[in-house]
Amino acid sequence: MISLNFRDSRPIYEQLKENLRQMILSGAIAAEEKLPSVRELASDLAINPNTIMRAYREMEAAGFIYTIPGKGSFAAPLNEVHDETRRKLMDQFSETARVLLQLGVSAQLLNEMIQKEADRIDSSKSSDQTV
Amino acid sequence: MISLNFRDSRPIYEQLKENLRQMILSGAIAAEEKLPSVRELASDLAINPNTIMRAYREMEAAGFIYTIPGKGSFAAPLNEVHDETRRKLMDQFSETARVLLQLGVSAQLLNEMIQKEADRIDSSKSSDQTV
Amino acid sequence: MISLNFRDSRPIYEQLKENLRQMILSGAIAAEEKLPSVRELASDLAINPNTIMRAYREMEAAGFIYTIPGKGSFAAPLNEVHDETRRKLMDQFSETARVLLQLGVSAQLLNEMIQKEADRIDSSKSSDQTV
Amino acid sequence: MISLNFRDSRPIYEQLKENLRQMILSGAIAAEEKLPSVRELASDLAINPNTIMRAYREMEAAGFIYTIPGKGSFAAPLNEVHDETRRKLMDQFSETARVLLQLGVSAQLLNEMIQKEADRIDSSKSSDQTV
DNA sequence: GTGGTCTAGACCACC
DNA sequence: GTGGTCTAGACCACT
């Protein structure tokens, strides 16, 4: 499920963080569920364990996962994601919205895009419940 | 009008791009208006001309400015900003919105943030017209 | 009364030590009172007896408890807590206070925080007496 | 000026952080002053550059220093130290104070210790000014 | 010359 | 078996 692009300019540990973050946010990895061990993931992705460790450590600093030495790393409940992480995302959202508005994109279109994303999330959640 | 933070971790050319982009988007630099020459700006900001060159080159690639050899660089009309630039911004907007929604932020709050940004832009434009 | 957080990054034996230490300091376990046996506690908390043993051993080294082979472990009177334990706490207190002062926190605020803690202890003790 | 104890159980990068933090807080490294480069310090202390990098990166996350790629790392003004860093120190202060009070140390003695630290800081500052 | 990233591989603490 | 730390050494981006 994890896709890395070695030709991407972004560091591997950043790509890895984004992959894991999305899996946790979407519910692909449930709260309290164990993530692959550092060694296991390093072996699967053919990547150095140190790179995995760095991704995990920074995910933990952001509040997305928690790590118990000797046991493994686990997905944190979404309400435990740190406030600073939220604040950064809000700032980025405002900034991007402002630029798009200045480029002539209507506020209405942006609202519709948000609604579209909200609907996608709802439908994926309800399908999860059905299962 | 250009503010660079030499203590910022972001490269100077990135900060320069953001400054120029914002000046063009806000109308501080009007469409078709000539930008400072590379040498001039390098002298004003006490920066290596190579750094200015790189910023201008990437701004041109994004469609924010166009360069006429021997005459200088000029701000492009906003409707000429490349579709790829727009697409990237839209993608980033959707992505950030989705993550915030997944974190439990309401679509309504996001809409309000957009409206707030739209109002700020309107008020700054009307004050520009007064001038 | 003992609360362990298996999601905490701190080792279980450290959490156990803090629980016991706090119970002794607060009077929840009176001086000379017998602590649960290693086996008993291991069974109650569903934890490896080795983990309990380590916590007890380190608590004894600090002077918070004493162990009589064949009879069990007992809470030591607070005045028998080892001087080295006290010294370490005092050093840590001074160190933290100094850093906060250097960061601009006023000595007055620190004094108020101490008074607040002292009040909390007094009130909990008087409620204990009522019982 | 930096003292590391390789026999200490604490990781080298933690000891290094404490050393640097104290040097910045005490003014031994002034605000905006450049810290030794990663390679330079690694060579001086006979330590792997990665270990230095980790200490620097975490110091930056706490707000004590800022790093400009290609230029070096610099001490941040004390008022830019992150609020979370401050909050953690306050929590640790309260916790330590509470335990000492429970051990029978008087609030008055703790206040005197704080005053003593405050005086030491004042005197070192005024001696700096004299110089 | 600076920091940033990544690899390969070692040893330790904890469970 | 797990994460945590550290070393040695390479290559890259930026100034």
Image (spheres, coloured by chain):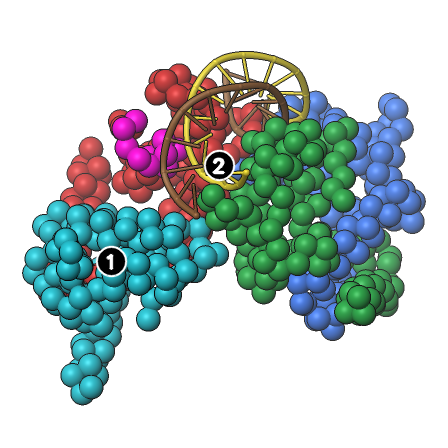
Chain colours: A green, B blue, C cyan, D red, E brown, F yellow
Q: Amino acid at mark 2?
A: Arg
Q: Around disc 1, counting alpha carbons within 10 Å, would you say few (fewer than 14), some (14 to 19), or many (20 or more)?
A: some
Is residue B131 in view?
no
At x 22% / y 78%, what residue is drawn?
Answer: C124
Q: Around disc 2, counting alpha carbons within 10 Å, would you say few (fewer than 14), some (14 to 19), or many (20 or more)?
A: some
Coordinates of residue B9 in the picture (x, y in percent): 57, 37
Q: Using the image, name the chain to which the residue with label 2 belongs.
A: D
Coordinates of residue D124 in the picture (x, y in percent): 19, 41
Q: Check the image and report above or below for B111 versus C124.
A: above
At x 15% / y 56%, what residue is drawn?
Answer: C70
Q: Which residues are magenta?
A: D5-15
At x 12% / y 61%, what residue is drawn?
Answer: C76
At numbered mark 1, what does the secondary structure look like: helix, strand or loop?
A: helix
- Which mark is on residue D96? 1
- In-front residue for pair F12/B68: F12
Q: Using the image, name the chain to which the residue with label 1 belongs.
A: D
Residue at the outermost front position = C70
Is residue C54 rendered to the left or right of residue D80? left
